[in-house]
Image (cartoon, helix red, strand yellow):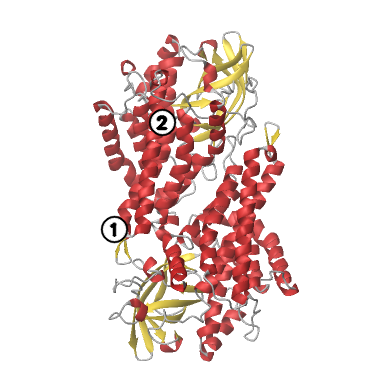
Amino acid sequence: MYNLQLSEEQLAIRDTVRDFVAAEITPVALQPARLEPFDPPLPLDLIETASALGLRSLALDEADGGAGADTLTRCLVAEELAAGDVDVAAVLTETAALGGLLFGQMMSADQRAAHLTDFVEDSGFHLALAAQEPDADSGLGTAYHRPRAARLPVTTATADGDDWVITGNKTRIANAPVARLFVVTAASDAGTVALLVPHDAPGLSVTETPRDGGWYHGAMGDVVLQDCRVPAANRLTGGNRDVSSLDDRGSVLAGTPEGQAINLGVARAAFDAALDYAKLRIQGGRPIVEHQAIGSMLADIAGSLELVRGAVWRAAWDADNPQARADGSLADIPHGLISQVAAADMLYRAAKDAAECFGAMGVMRDMPMQKYIHDTRLFRHSGHGASDARLRLAEALAGHEPR
Amino acid sequence: MDFSLNEEQIAWQMKARKFAEEEIRPVSLARDAIAEPADTIDWDLIKKGSRLGFRTSVVSKEQGGHGIDYVTQALVMTELARADSAVSKTFSQCWKWSHLIAAACTDDQKERFLKPFLADDTYVLGFGQTEANSGSDNRMPPPDAPNAGVRLRAELDGDHWVLNGEKQFIAHGNIAKLFFLYVRTDFSVPFTDGTTILLIPNDTPGFSVGKVYNKSGWRFYQNGEMVFEDARVPVANQIGATNAALRKGEGDQSGDMFGDLELAANALGICDAACEQALATIKSRQLRGEPLANQQLVQLKIGRMNMVTEALRAYVMRVAWEHDQKVHSNNAGLAMNLATDTVQEVTELNMDIHDGAGRGMERAADKLARDAFIWSHLAGDTVQRLKVSGRVIRAA
């Protein structure tokens, strides 16, 4: 049954995270010392504290020590975290999503046994998908409606006795600087393989992407693998999920409802700030919210947030409940892409309009509004960008199968 | 309506283009990337530009300046902004108040302030109006709020005004050698009838610079907080009559008449830069062997960027021409509002052209969008739009 009524558990998780963000994250995130620098350090202590609440291992089954959170629940958490600090949200949501995928669907029993305890118990244990490679960008529509030949990674994995030996470069990998365990894709005699590579495997090195101008949230780095050796048993066989679903990306969040929920959290923070300010700020003899021009702008922002939230939740429900399409409750179209396109455009506009309410303070680096604009802008243009997402949606509407 | 340029106008345009290409563009991104806001300005660049006449362009020839007309002003601002919008504004901020000096200063004031302004390549001008609780109210005085507007207090003590209070978000607040300051000289009436303009040299006792603001865009262009504690300013530094700051009359060319054109012409330079960047990128970049220029969506974006940029150019030139011809219209304000929409759309489309999973955003494209967002707070916010709408409605 298609039903977006939140469960008691979902409401409890959301409220817990909301309280945690208000008490612990927002006071730090709004400090000029964090807002002003071009290269603010990742607030690892906040990420650790949030991990201790279970937000890093959210998607693991309860039996494995997680919360068994479905996509919608992870969206609720991602939005709340991002309303506090987008970098905290990005790192935790990446690990949570990849954790659910790996431990829940893709690892063998032995692989789970090898990593699950460490993952659950170490609050600094993060995960990264190292698939994206330099010069492999197919953004801006260059692959639109073309048959995409199965493209092997340039990175190679060669069987050598009981080991795989991996050599290659991975670029702009989310969480790379903080990851303890990587999923690395590589070309082998058996086609594309996905291998589990610990961060301290000999031959693996990470270079952190400079934050300023790096145009990313959370943590990002390039990964170099030079004769990096891992046991043959580290190959992910996919379990009930095809490893090719890992695609060639640098993040598991690209185009997912959780990714859009982070964007939504940012825009919500912008809106909340603007509404509070518009009630307090007096110009023209009354609070500016009482002027039609500002009031209607805030109304549009509120509307945009709710429309996007609806699209994101629908996409999350779609991801969790295949039967909703089967019985016609949901249209058989890519809801994730629809939410991505809607979020990219509407939330950027929302953040920009919210900042406008602040006059000159909207552009000052010691105030958060300019950062909300930057952060929502980043969602329009990172990855392949919103324009490309629109084209992928168009392909799907035409029944084009990219692979 | 004839927009063909005469030789002198073309000469200024070419001089500005050369200076922009050879001197501004090479340092623009590096200046933008300096973290400390007070350090982004490059005084060598200002001196070079000043020696070429860009600081004093608008002072009349009789008074020792260059006396360029509005069309030339628009051309120069656009050319400079094409290399760096904030550098262009640093120069044109001096023009804005050159207009006021010419229109309203006494011979004695011109002697004391215009001469050093002309002689010193680092002498830049500022204007202090905005305060913590008077921003929009100053630009669009509310008829029903007698306590609104300028609060910085000036009291007469013999032949001096004594100033107490603060100004916020003041362009050149930390670097100008001379300010035109709005001060409240009568609290018993609405500020529109109780505000006076004073000339404040930066060495005025009791004046100090507060915070230097750290902006996300226009980083080169300095902006600071001004603090006055029993600052003493000679009555001889008063411009016009007491309490008459906001009653300058229709003939004044210092305020919106120039300022609206300025923001439109500067935005046009950013649009030109964005179009240029986008075209260079699509012609040089390939993704997986596919030239970007072959993509329909990319082509449509290029078309749109150029279409709205050229429409803005036509409007900017019309406004400049109208100013030179002394044609009164509401076009300057409308062009300024339009410039906000145009410059933001064009810089956002330029970012679209630079999307891609394998890289961050080009810093140059990012800078244009950050610079363009400044217009939301100067030229296209609802107050600036309502103000212009009001002119249109009143004129009908």
Tell which subunit mark 2 falls on: A
In the image, is residue A383 above or below residue B80? above
Q: Residue furthest top?
A: A161
Provide the secondary structure element on which disc 2 rests. Answer: helix
Give the residue pinned by disc 2.
A93
Q: Quadrant of the N terminus of chain A?
A: top left
Tell me whether marks 2 and 1 sit on the same chain: yes
Provide the secondary structure element on which disc 1 rests. Answer: helix
Place of residue B78 in the rendered image (x, y in percent of width and height, measured from the top left): 63, 63
On the picture, is A154 further left or further right than A359?
right
Is disc 2 surrounded by few (<14), some (14 to 19) or many (20+) residues within 10 Å?
Answer: many
Instruction: Please report the residue visible at 47 percent of the width from the left and 60 percent of the height from the top.
Output: B380
Of label 2 and label 1, which has the lower sequence position?
Answer: 2
Instruction: Please report the residue visible at 61 percent of the width from the left and 11 percent of the height from the top.
Output: A190
Residue type at mark 1 is Leu
Give the residue pinned by disc 1.
A280
Residue type at mark 2 is Thr
Q: Quadrant of the C terminus of chain A?
A: top right
Place of residue A114 in the rendered image (x, y in percent of width and height, measured from the top left): 43, 14
Is disc 1 surrounded by few (<14), some (14 to 19) or many (20+) residues within 10 Å?
Answer: few
| Residue A30 shows in the view | no
Place of residue B240 in the rendered image (x, y in percent of width and height, measured from the top left): 45, 86
| Residue A142 shows in the view | yes
Residue B281 placement: quadrant: top right
Residue B26 placement: quadrant: bottom right
Q: Are marks 2 and 1 in contact (CB under 8 Å)?
A: no
Q: Residue furthest front?
A: B396
Q: Nearer the viewer, residue A169 or A202?
A: A169
Q: Nearer the viewer, residue B392 or A41?
A: B392
